[in-house]
Structures are given as structure tokens and as C-alpha cells.
Image (cartoon, helix red, strand yellow):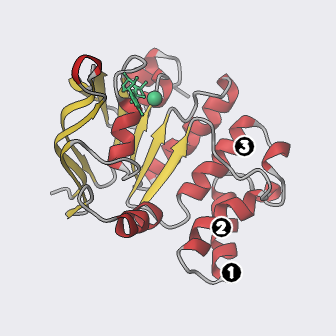
Amino acid sequence: MSTTVLRTRGLRKEYGRGATLVRAVDDVDLDVAAGETVAVMGPSGCGKSTLLQLLGGLDRPSGGEVTLNGRRVDGSGEKALARIRRDEIGFVFQAFHLMEELTAVENVEFPALMAGRSPRAARRRALELLERVGLAERARFLPSALSGGQRQRVAVARALSNEPSVVLADEPTGNLDSAATIEVLRLFEELHRAGQTLVVVTHDARIAATADRLISMRDGAFVDETRLTGGTTGQLGALVGLED
Ligand code: ADP
Ligand code: MG
């Protein structure tokens, strides 16, 4: 039996009111099992980013529930929510959001330092993570000296800093060229194999192909769900020519 890491029931987020009311997320029920990769696809403006923000406690729902490891997130106070975001969730954004004045390793160790780890332990872990994403020799580089794909790999390493229960990625390859997209794709495949629970919003069929499940979103709601078979690069992977 699989454990549910992330669960929503009747999740809603509305913006505006009256004639300008937008139902950005409209009655979403989602269960993400431990070790599962879920991809969410849908047209621009259908609510994907809003959904991820609600899942990660970056924004508060208008209604419904978000549960992480059996604990309600949506009703938490600001302090508790900040702790959940820091310790239990890893975020990866389209625009990387690295701190430009810090080196790669300083970016990666930052969340661990914030969580109260010793500088030595945080540094050791950050260097391990950079090695894992294939950037050990770039540890002392500033983000400005890294390619887009390398920056996003640093951002993924940072997201893993506190061993999050789930990584939430919002169009992680949206700013990347095709070669860099493959770098990030390989990394997500590796995370998946290592059992990391992952929710990824993407326009890229190659990224979606790494998922166990593909959810289509329209106008704030889930309209279709496909279970992908055949491992991390299954049918979709074959379709887009990713077979080795
Ligand atoms: P997606 O990520 O799928 O492109 P978003 O979640 O960003 O979609 O947006 C969903 C809908 O909610 C859109 O209609 C968008 O204009 C609206 N929206 C998002 N954020 C806000 C906000 N802060 N204020 C008002 N409307 C918003
Ligand atoms: Mg978006």
C-alpha cells in the first residue's frame, strides 16, 4: 500500500469578485503517493501555478483542504507555514530564483542554514547535492557564470537541501533551450528513480513523459488523467524520440 504524501480535497482559489471573479483553482481533488511523479499540463492561465502555490503553502486557498503527510497545511499560521515550506517542500521555478550574489554552493546550503544546521554540515550536504546534479566543479561559481541548464540544476539541488517530502516544479524548463531541457529532464528522472515525490507543471511533453501520471487542467479544474506506463520514459518518451 502506498502512502499519500500530498492530498487536496475541494481545493479552490478565487481572485477578484462579482463580474471580475476568476476561479483559478476550482474544486481540485489530488492524491500524490510517496515516490510518485505527477505532471500537470494545460493552457496558459488554467491555474497551474496557483495550484502549485496552494500545494506548497505559498498562497492560501479560498476553500478546501491541503494535507501534507497527514497534516493540514491550509489552516496553519504564518510561522508554521514558513517552517513547512522550508523543511518539507522543495520549490523549483521557471526563472530559477537563485541569489545572484551567492555562489552555487552558497545558494544550495542556504535553506539548510536557515533550518539551523551547522555551517559545516550544511556545506557538506550542499557539496554532495552539487555532485549529485553534476556540478561539483562549479560549486564556487556565481549564477551569472553558469548556463541556464546549470542554474536550474543548482536550483534543484537547493530544493533538495532539507530533504523535502515533495518537490514542486513550475515550468522548470520554460526558460531553457532544448539541450538544457534534456539536462533537467535527466535530473528529474534520477530523482524519480531515487524515490523523490515530485509534482511538475510543464508544457514540455518530454518532461511530462518522466511522470507516472499526467493530469490535464482547464479553467482551474482537472479534466483528464492518464497513467503512464513503461517506466520513466514510457509511451510519451517513445513518441517524442527519447528512447536511448
Ligand atoms: P497558469 O500557471 O496555468 O498559467 P495561473 O495559476 O498563473 O495559471 O493563473 C490562473 C488564473 O488566475 C488566470 O486567469 C490568472 O489571470 C489568474 N490569477 C493568477 N494570479 C492572480 C492574482 N494574483 N490576482 C488575480 N488573478 C490572478
Ligand atoms: Mg504558470
Residue carrying label 1: 119
Q: Residues within 10 Å of mark 2 (few under 14, many from 20)?
A: many
Residue carrying label 3: 150
- The Cα atoms of the two marked residues, 2 and 1, are separated by 8 Å
Disc 1 marks which amino acid? Pro
Q: Is mark 2 within 8 Å of ligand 2?
A: no
- The Cα atoms of the two marked residues, 2 and 3, are separated by 16 Å
Residue 56 location in percent, x, y? 38, 51
In the depicted structure, whether residue 27 falls above or below residue 4: above
What residue is rendered at 40% in x and 47% in y?
Answer: 198
Secondary structure beneath label 3:
helix
Give the number of the disc on residue 109: 2
Disc 2 marks which amino acid? Glu
Disc 3 marks which amino acid? Gln
Residue 109 location in percent, x, y? 65, 67
Q: Is mark 1 within 8 Å of ligand 2?
A: no
Horizontal side of 195 relative to 190 (left or right) equals left
Secondary structure beneath label 2:
helix
Name which of mark 2 and mark 3 comes first in the sequence.
Answer: 2
Q: Are marks 2 and 1 in contact (CB under 8 Å)?
A: yes
Residue 195 location in percent, x, y? 40, 55
Q: Quadrant of residue 21?
A: top left
Asked whether 64 or 77 is in front, the reply is 77
